[in-house]
Image: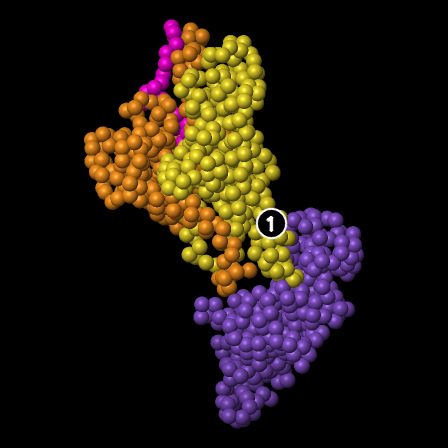
Amino acid sequence: MSGLVLEGISKRFNNVAAVDHVDLSVPNGTFVCMLGPSGCGKTTLLRTIAGLEEPTSGRILIDGKDITKLPAHQRDFGMVFQSLALFPHLNVGENVAYPLRIRGVGKADQVKRAEELLALVDLGGFAGRPVSKLSGGQRQRVAIARALALSPKLFLLDEPLSALDAKLREAMQVELRKLQQRLGITTIVVTHDQREAMTMADLVVVMGNGRIQQAASPVEIYRKPVNSFVADFIGSTNLLPVRQAMDGQGVSAPGGTIPGVALGAGRDQATLSVRPEDVHLVPADQAPLTGRISFIRDLGASIETFVDAGGTQIVAVTSPRERAAFQVGDTVGLRLDPEACRVLSS
Amino acid sequence: MRPEPPRRIADYSPLAFPAVMLTVFFVVPFGIMVMVSFFRRQQGGFYTPDFVLESYARFLSTFFGGVLSFSLGLAACVALICVIVGFPFTYELARAKRWVQVSWLVALLSVLSLSEVIIGFAWSTLLSRTAGISNLLVWLGMMDKPVALTPNFGAVLTGMVYQAFPYTVLVLYPAMARLDPTLMEAARTLGSHPLKAFLTVVVPALRNTIVATFIMVFVFALGSYLLPQLLGRPQHWTLSVLITDQAVYQSNMPFAAAMAVFLVLVTLSLVGLALLVGRKDAAT
Amino acid sequence: MTGTLFRRVLFGLVALFMAAPLIVIAGVSVNAQRTLVFPPVGFSMRWYGSVFTDAAWRGSLTASVVVATLAAALAVCIAFPLSWFLWRRHAPWARVFQMLGTAPFVLPPVITALGFLAFWTTVGAYGQPWTVVVAHGIFFVTLPLVTLSLGFASIDRSLVEAASTMGADDRTILRTIVLPLIRPYLISGFAFAFVLSLNEYIVAYMAVGFTLETLPIKIFNSLRYGYTPTMAAVSILFVAVAALIFGLIARFGDLPKLLGAWSSKD
């Protein structure tokens, strides 16, 4: 197939598997976010794709061609490093033109292309500046422009926005996504920030313990997590231990029952994941599941209500407009939307 | 980039020139020197290949014992003085303004790089009767007539302290520059007098560094080959001077080599000790 | 404050001690007459002139500068590939060569000197002028080795990775990234080795003492025939050259960092 294909990629360091049997196909033009907690193997996987690490086993194919053994400098991918890795002895223009210079492109063409690339990232006229005189966001753009200099087949970014403050980071996420759509370039971004992944990606790859836990669209990842690792890592969620109800109608949970949910054939207990925004607070007599409010956190834009239901904590998020007249210590009913409840495999 | 192990022969190529140079011009000469120490000495400055312990046997003389104990004692005196003065000095230096630090470092490096010949010449001039400081004292009316302050033990000691002091400061400097400044401040806020804080906080914190520095300066002082000769009398000659004298003027290479081997063993065991002690500090 | 007073007194006394012999020989070097007298009688710069005009002194000066330049270049040529390899590759056993490079500097100099004397005699090259270049190159290899190791340690490895993802092979990375970044350390390593070689006596003496008179050998040999103001002038020139070179390193580099303190920028 066309695009990037990883077949059974493993990378071991001193017999510890950093990446463990990863299979993945990325069609051309896709924006992929590899998401996971630190130490989950996502950076190692990215470096393996870039050719900076050699996989212990497995194959990497690009448009059907095996590039597993190809050294990094022959892969012609563009990469942005977490540290940005801007060359301190070169100015902005020279940094951007570096890939062209080492390929023997003429001086005039180098300058012209560097200007184009800098204009692309809104840094027109910055070519002559020293790198040390740039702000964090500007350095970021230079690194991106430099990685795109060769119009690479694959654009790889390792935690590219982690050094920026929250506001600038959100703006850059949008910009990066727009840039990718304009260029139609296959892009893989490693991040530990799930908001970042949700903002930018066509395909979110959630990694944990060296393995891919789930690879799907952002909405599917959020709405239909396949296991508790994904459910817990992507956004916040309530994880409830449930068992098949005696009457066969729904499931029983600590604090009551949840109608309309089925565990599936052959199972009598499971974990149920439900997003806080899908938990609705109602008077105690209007729902079969009840609990006592232990804490209310008013964040202005939303209100988080912590409910103790039979020893398990359930969080409900409501908007201030639908502020219910409940107080700490009240017993409330919890209505869960059966559509929003997700039965997890483990 | 993680440093990768070399895989192909070509990956080793940068190592070739340094390895050859260091082997041919350091390991081999060293080996030859060790061999020569077992050779038999001929009259007239020659020696023939052999395996005799004749040169080592000379160590057992009282003369050699005297030279050895004098060398070690002198080096210990120099190291002691240098560390006692150098420790508070470096402490203050590392806390001075940056330009003050840099100026001192430039000055100390300049003196440290000075040839022993020049240091010896300068001090013997300073201590001489005709051009020395005693003339200054006469000129000031504090003395009747100029006197020679060299050659004697004091002159040797002074010259060697002068030579070793910059070295001491430069060995102590990294540890002092990295010492947590809040350590001293914490002691001060607890009400300690600065001197007491220095003695009870800084000195114990750097105890191993002090010991390691003492050993390094000791070894450095052992290497002094000209000052005892220029500023002292023959009874002030050290092992280094004696090795030079045997090799060049007495043309007794086997004996010079045997003494050199002995000096290497002393030095290496001391340096090993210093590294061991120094590492302990780094670990804490 | 008592702290500053203590510092001033201590710095003052140490400065006096370190400067005293230099002040005396500086005074002696401008004496108008040929004998050494201090305080100087009259004032004359002619002894400085004679370092350059007197054929013997000028010969020694030339010999010293040539030897120091070549020896420092050799030391850098040995230290650079070694420290580059140690930084680039993971090869613990190669540390042996680093140890060998440091050993001559830690051991008493007379050992290295004697080793070379035995070596050059054995291979039959004793007294050849070039032998002192090799001897000094090995003896002072420690200095560029230390500055270059520090320099390499300060290069962010992701720069090298970045260059390789942009298509640069090892050789190109060395030329376009590593060399420009390491240059200040290369220069200071060369400068350290140069100044020390200029001043070195015992290794040079045992290698070529009877055939080539470097300045320290010349001074030492002249000491036997009495002290002259020219020697004082040469000594002051040496101090000035050292101070100038180390001053330049301090001006264009980070001297405290080179000497092991953490960078003030950290």
Which residue is labeled 1 in the image? C179
Please state the horizontal and vertical placement of residue A76, each as a whole percent of the image. 67, 66
Q: Residues within 10 Å of mark 1 (few under 14, many from 20)?
A: few
Residue C191 picture quarter = top right
Query: What type is the residue that disc 1 sits on?
Result: Leu
Q: Which chain is orange?
A: B
Residue A31, placed above or below residue B64 = below
Q: Position of residue B237 (x, y in %)?
A: 31, 27
User: Viewed as shown, does residue B164 lie left or right of A288?
Assistant: left
Q: Is B144 part of what is drawn in magenta?
A: yes
* x 38%, y 7%: residue: B145
Using the image as rendered, state which of residue C228 and residue A60 is in the foreground: C228
What's the residue at 54%, 25% (across, down)? C58
On the image, the x and y values in percent for residue C23 come to: 49, 19
Q: Which residues are magenta?
A: B142-165
Q: Nearer the viewer, residue B160 or C62?
A: C62
Q: Is residue A159 above or below residue B155?
A: below
What is the display colour for chain C? yellow
Chain A palette colour: purple
Q: Nearer the viewer, residue C239 or B30?
A: B30
**Residue A222 vertical position relative to residue A189 in the rendered view, above or below:** below
Q: Quadrant of residue A115 in the image?
A: bottom right
